[in-house]
Structures are given as C-alpha cells and as structure tokens.
Amino acid sequence: MSGRGRLALCSFAATLMAAGALVPLVKPASWLIQAAFMAGIVSGVGALVRRVPVARALTVVLQAVAALLMLTMVFAREQALLVMVPTPDAFVEFGRLLSAGGDDVARYAIPAPATEGIRLMLIGGVLLIGLAVDTLAVTFRSAAPAGLPLLALYSVAAGLSGGSGGWLWFLLAATGYLLLLLAEGRDRLSQWGRVFGAAPSSRGRLSSAFDGSGRAPVRTGRRIGVVALGLALAVPAALPALDGGLLAGAGRGNGSGLGGGGTISAVNPLVSLQDNLNQPEDREALRYRTNAEDTQNLYLRIMALDRFDGTSWRFSQRKVEDVPDQLPDAPGLRDDIGTTEITTNISAAGWYRQNYLPMPYPATKVNVDGRWRFEPTGRTLVGDRGQSTRGVRYEVGSLLVNPTSEQLASAPEPPAALLREYTQVPSTLPDVVRRTARDVTEGATTEYEKAVRLQDWFALDGGFTYDTEVDSGTGITAITRFLQNKEGFCVHFSFTMAAMARTLGIPARVAVGFTPGTPQPDGSMSVGLRDAHAWPELYFEGVGWTRFEPTPSRGSAPDYTRPDIPSDVPSDTSRPETGSSAEPSTAPSASESCPAGSEQLSGCGTVAPGVAPPPGDEGFPLKTVLLAGLSALAVLLVPLLPLLWRTRIRARRLASGADDDPTERTLAAWREITDTAWDHGIPPDDSRTPRKAAVRVIRLGRLEGPAADAVHRVAGSVEQVLYARVPRPATGLAEDARLIHEALRSSVGRRSRLRALLAPRSSIRVIWSVSARWTDFRGRWGLHRLPLRRWEAMIRRRPSRQEG
C-alpha cells in the first residue's frame, strides 16, 4: 500500500475511534455504522481523486460534494432532485432536522433516542470531522494538526456523556491519533530515507537504519506515543490541585458535584418540553409505597429553579456536600406548624435516568446507595461522577406540612437577604406583568391572600386553558404571550405566577418534579411520564417554602389555599394501604396515570424532565445507505469521466514495452501531443504535414527552448516512420510528450488549465467513436434510411476534417 493509502486508512480509523465516544449518547448505535460507511465513501473519493494530479482544494471540494449527496440521499430524498441532488427544499429540510435535533438534545436524557434530527447531527458531524482529518493528514500531508478536530470530537462527546466510559473512549481516540502520526512519519521517512534513532551497536544495524524501511522510526514513534499518553493520564492524577486534565470530569453526570464541597451547575430541565407533551405512551418512571394516609400533597420534587434572568427560570450554582445522616431542618419552618412524619420507599425504573433524586418535600432523611451529594439551599440530592436514578431504590423520610390559612396569613416578613434574592426580576420584565399582578390582587391585605388570588385567577377565574399545542418558551416574551392568549401548559402557569408573585414582593421559585401518581391494587403508587409537572413555591416565614397549584386540571390545590375546607380533612378518597412502608414493587403498571376523561382536555400530556421513551428501532437501513453511497459515487464520477478517460488514454499512449511496434509507439506519442494541444485550445488540423503541424503548435502554444525542440523531434520521428524507406525508431518520445504537456499547461491561464483537466476537448473522440459504431450498426441492420437527427450531425462535426 502506498504512503498516502496508509495515511487515508489511518485517518479513517482515527475518525471512527474518536467517534466511538458518541456511542453512549444515543441508542441504538446503528448510526455509527451508517457514519462509518459514509466516511469510508468520502475517504475513498479522496483516494481516487488524489490519483489524478488535481489541485488540493478541488480534492476537498469533491469529497464534500460526496458527503452532501449521501446526506441528501438519507435525510432529504423526498426534497432532492433525482433522490440525491440537493435542492433549496432539501436545505430547508436539513435546517428543520437540525433544529429538531437541537430540541431533542435539550429534551432527552442520555442515552437519547436516535431521532432523525439527532442522527443527522451525529452522522453529519462525523463526516465533517472525517473530512477535516483527511484533508489535513492526507491531502496536505500534515497529520499533527489533524489531532485538533479529533480532540474536538472526543471533547464534545465526553462532555455530553458526562464521562461515561470516558477512559476507554479516550484511549481509542488517542490510539487512532498515534497511528495517524506513525503512518505519516513512516511515509515521510520512506521518501527521505534519513532516520534519527538510537545509535546502532554494529555496522549491519547502521545500514539497516538507513535502508528506508522505517522500522527504527516506528519503534521510536511507539515509544514517544506511549510516553505521551502515559503523561496525559498520569499528570492530572499526580496533581490533584489542577482539578483537570484530559480525563477530568470522566464519570461526572450533568450537574454532578465535584466531591469535597464543590458546586453544581444544572441545566434547566424545562428548556423544551412541548414536543413530549402529547406522547401516546405513558411509561412508569417511579413506583413507591408510603405510610401517608393522604397522598394528594405527596408531590415528588426533583429540583427548584430559583433564578429568573428574563430568558428563563434557571437553577443557581450552589455548594454541595456529603449527604448527612439527618438532613437539616427545613428553612423557615416553626415548631408550632402542624407536620406529619412519613416514610416513602421509592423505586426508579431501569430506563429512567435523572441526575436529581425525586423526593417528597421537605425530606428529613434519605437512605440511598451510590454517589449522591446534598445541596442544602434547594434541599436536593444530586448524582456525582455519573450517578443517576436509573434502577435506584431508596427510602425517604419527610414531613407533610399542614399549615392553616390563619398561620399563612399572619406570617411575618421574611429575612432581608432571602427577600432580596427571591424577589429579583429582570429590568426588561414588561409592565403588563406587574400591572396584571396588582389588578388581580387588588384589595388583598396579606401576602397569603395575594398568593391565593393569583392561584385562583390562573386555575379558576381568569379564563385560562391548559393547552399543549401553544408556542413553547420560558422567557418574558412567552409570559407576555401567555397572559394575552391565556393558553399554555404547566411551565407557563408556574413561571408566570412565580414572576408575578415576585413583583408583589413575595419570594417565589419554581419546583420541578411529579404529581403523586395513581394508586395501584397492591397498595403502591405508580408515577408515569404524564405525572411530570412544574409548580410555584412561595415563601412564608414560619412555614417555609409552600406549594401552590395554578395549573387547571393538573395536580390538586392544597387545602390551606381553600379556606372553606378544613385542612385536617383529606379530599383524596383513593388512598394506598395504611401502615408501615414496604419495599416497592418494580412491576410495570398497566393502568394509565390520567383520570378517565381527562385525555380530551390535554391535561395529562406532560413528560418527565429530560426523559422520553425511546422510539422503536426500525433496523439499520443497509439498502438505503448502500444506494446512497453508490449513487453518490455515480453522480460524482459522471463529471469526472472526461478527466478519467483522458488520464487513461495518456497513460496507454505513453506506456512503452519491449515488444511495442516502433511505428505505433511513435504515432501514439504524436497523437498524445496533438490532443494535449487541443485540450489547451489548439485544435488539430490533419491537412498539415507533421512538420507544419509542429510549427503551428509551437507558434500558437508559445513554446520555446526544450519544449519547442521536443515538438520538432517527435514530428521528425513521425515523418521517419511514415515516409522513410528504413525507419529509424526514436527514443524518449514519452518524455518529450510529458515535457510538451507541462509547457502547454504553463502557457495558459488557470481557467484554461482547469478546463483542460476537467473537460478536455479531445474527449469528444469518445462520442465520435460511439457515432461511428452507431453508423456501422445502422448499416448492418438496414437502418441507414432512418432520418439523421440534428444531434447526430452535430457530434459528427470534426475540426479541420480531423478523423482521429
């Protein structure tokens, strides 16, 4: 295999090794087979084009065209011309898929389903990185910079996956890069022949070191690679104060702690929920048993969004610590507030992955195995180093807080620091939000009464409709539109009420989690995707963070917000079995989480933050990918046919063998010179003698010096073999033809050179040959009387009676 062939193979392998880091992100991983096949086609196109002396930039362009044709065939065939040629509609489809893929990335937990948008992003990204690596390492013969796109591919994958199996993928990516470097070094040394290595111990070994075999540099390269890889792995481990390195973060989940009291920085889990709101399948995410007599207030809270910047509600960076045996007291909760201690045993489904542990609020004790950290301000447990809820069983002790309306109404003013932090609103918040909040709460004398009026206005009196089909959004624009159209889902209701409460001076934040779920015959509670929810929490000194429910047809309004109903009378008639908690069952529930008849109200359509059921695997579309690859090659080769034909003809004419007839060899060289001049704008003229034709080529081609002498020399040889009684065979005709070719190329501009390369005029001889065979066929079968079409007459035209 040639040096460039080894480089191309190593660049292809290095790209696939680095792309392996993307495997944990998406299931199923059949997309990698598609990406490998397409990347192989792109690499093959580059290897084929590089066999022809074309500009390097043209090689890259042709490889990019091949990639685009294959992507069009697979992802936008309905909008393409002839299935694979991209049209403006095809590019619009690409944009739509990329936008949908971006939404899917924000929505789904890892591993995400292989939706069309995500597959386009993955396959397109691998092709782009593969093209960059091939361009740098093979086309431009510079393998060292090719590590940058490989590093980018690995880094993005490792960052998104939270380091799942990061050391393995890092080793694969690093191995691919080292192979690429070794292949380039061997190729360079094989051409140069000089080896720098250890001093040989004998004369024989010295000779072998300079024989161009490259064995010594390969050994040296291996040693350098092993040492470099070892340093990359060992140095960060030996220097813990750096808190980084190539494998820093390996094993960390999204938002996970850093160990030893670091911070967490979570991504808003409600960035994009709308596409999942009406999923037809309600999968069970959690199942629990509890000794609580009433479960209507047993919301399973995941986290709280406490920072509103005008764009969305977000989770602030907070310090985390080890999970204590007994969690600290809930902030703001006085001893005289009625509470009930309960114990809940929860089991998460094997497919449900969440970095935050769903728990009743406020939890007092958590018994869970794994790497979990405690964030005191939000009272949440967050997974560390990749820890998630997948298949986790845990026990939570918590309090059911039962304040009375009188206690809430008489709550004193919160601490100044808390009031300042949780009443902040962006300066860009429209006045309509403040004005509406004042209008709704006009006449209310206490903060509690204002909060209840806001809740009832959204849920009962304001004319709002729960609708999952409205435009999504979480910023001030979405809030304004929501107040105007009065249509939205739980995100809009909770975010808007919390923002309005803050304008009234009431500390507020947004909680994310699950409603209590559905009772099961065995006494357990089943929590499905449709039980996912968001609700506002408002702070009242003496009671603490208090749940409100502004979303109509979702959850249940707390008893303390309904003064006509005593707070000690449960309103939920469906209760699980009372008694001590037991180990929850992990059997999937066959019942629906939605009450009967509520499906038509679109009130049970939410899904768990960051999770979604994976789509069915339709299998690897081998036929489609094969057809796309073959079609891409066909479309790419059609414009290159003249170039390939001309290259083959030139090689045949200038090839020489011991048994070749001198006359045929001489005439072949002359035909090659004639066609080369034709390709560069000098049409042939068979009415001239070889000597006069040579003068014409020299004059029109502005040849001089050795090139002009070569033309005269070949013309003289032609006269010898055609007219001399005893022809004297000439030598060096092929070298003369190549010299004339280079001189003619140098005498014309770049555009003419490109035309001579890609669309040589002499390739018309192929059409002449087909026309001659067609004429012979018509005469043989008696079809010569058929009328001659105009296009046949055109292709038969020859310059200056040239017969080829």
Image (cartoon, rainbow, N blue to C red):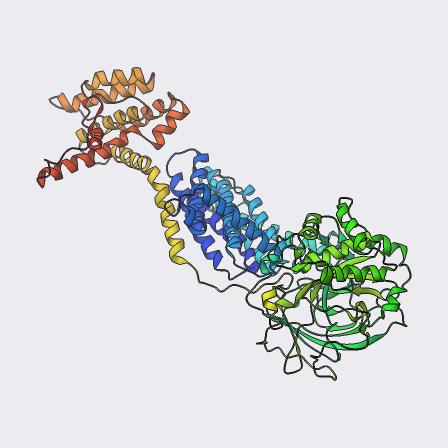
Left/right of residue 113 with respect to residue 56 in the rendered view: right
Q: Quadrant of residue 730?
A: top left
Q: Quadrant of residue 539?
A: bottom right
Q: Position of residue 85 (x, y in %)?
A: 40, 43
Q: Position of residue 733 (x, y in %)?
A: 26, 27
Residue drawn at x 58%, y 51% is 102
Left/right of residue 101 with respect to residue 665 in the rendered view: right
Residue 405 visible within the image: yes
Residue 201 visible within the image: no
Q: Is residue 538 above or below residue 792?
A: below
Q: Position of residue 306 (x, y in %)?
A: 77, 56
Q: Nearer the viewer, residue 705 or 573?
A: 573
Q: Nearer the viewer, residue 204 or 668?
A: 668
Q: Nearer the viewer, residue 522 or 323?
A: 522
Q: Position of residue 146 (x, y in %)?
A: 54, 43
Look at the image and tell me in which quarter the C terminus lies.
Answer: top left
Left/right of residue 100 with respect to residue 783 in the rendered view: right
